[in-house]
Image (cartoon, rainbow, N blue to C red):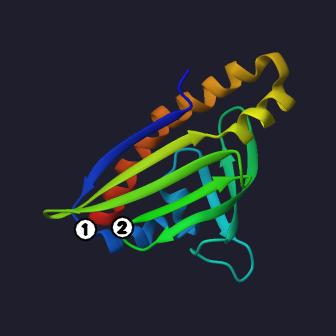
């Protein structure tokens, strides 16, 4: 099973504008089908080394995660890692005629696999497959919502 998924969308807005939207994690709840809210640690913001908390909801459960911003380059890339070592979410931008191409990527890291083995034991692979499927369906939905908001 592949612990990575990525998809892209073209947006009729400059890369800097799209970056400003996605790096404002307090807006993530506007377009994510799972993440309903995010907030920065006091005094933090969209810069490398910053931490934020996200609240996620599905029909089965509600949970919060802490994430560390690894890359914050305006107009180019915004990347954070859940738990600092478990799951990497990246938003990369490239300028194209008429706007930008936004790519959202999800990667399950070795620290996440270790955490899943500890939490779920023999069910870890099945649980990872559920998360991968959520990324596979959630990323296109998130990208479409970001595009709609950016082009309004």
Q: Secondary structure at mark 2?
A: helix
Residue at the spot of label 2: 18
Locate the N terminus and report the quarter of the image it occupies.
top right
Position of 6 compared to 124: left or right? left
Return the mark for residue 13.
1
Q: Residue at x 69, y 66 (%)?
A: 52
Locate the C terminus and report the quarter of the image it occupies.
bottom left
Distance from Cα at disc 1 to Cα at disc 2: 7 Å
Q: Residue at x 34, y 60 (%)?
A: 93
Pinpoint residue 35: horizontal percent, then vertical percent. Answer: 60, 51
Q: Secondary structure at mark 1?
A: loop
Q: Nearer the viewer, residue 58 or 13?
A: 13
Q: Residue at x 60, y 63 (%)?
A: 70
Seen from this angle, which residue lies furthest bottom? Answer: 43
Return the mark for residue 68.
none
Q: Residue at x 81, y 16 (%)?
A: 122
Position of 17 compared to 40: left or right? left
Q: Earlier in the sequence, mark 1 or mark 2?
A: 1
Callout 1 touching callout 2 (CB < 8 Å) = yes
Pinpoint residue 136: horizontal percent, then vertical percent. Answer: 47, 33
């Amino acid at each position: 099973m592949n612990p990575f998924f990525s998809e892209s969308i073209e947006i009729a807005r400059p890369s800097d504008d799209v970056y400003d939207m996605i790096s404002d994690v307090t807006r993530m709840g506007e377009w994510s089908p799972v993440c309903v809210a995010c907030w920065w640690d006091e005094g933090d913001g969209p810069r490398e080394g910053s931490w934020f908390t996200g609240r996620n909801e599905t029909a089965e459960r509600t949970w919060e995660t802490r994430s560390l911003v690894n890359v914050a380059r305006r107009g180019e890339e915004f990347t954070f890692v859940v738990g600092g070592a478990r799951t990497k979410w990246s938003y990369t931008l490239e300028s194209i005629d008429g706007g930008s191409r936004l790519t959202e990527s999800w990667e399950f890291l070795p620290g996440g696999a270790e955490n899943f083995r500890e939490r779920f034991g023999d069910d870890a692979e099945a649980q990872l497959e559920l998360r991968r499927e959520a990324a596979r369906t959630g990323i296109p939905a998130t990208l479409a919502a970001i595009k709609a908001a950016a082009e309004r």
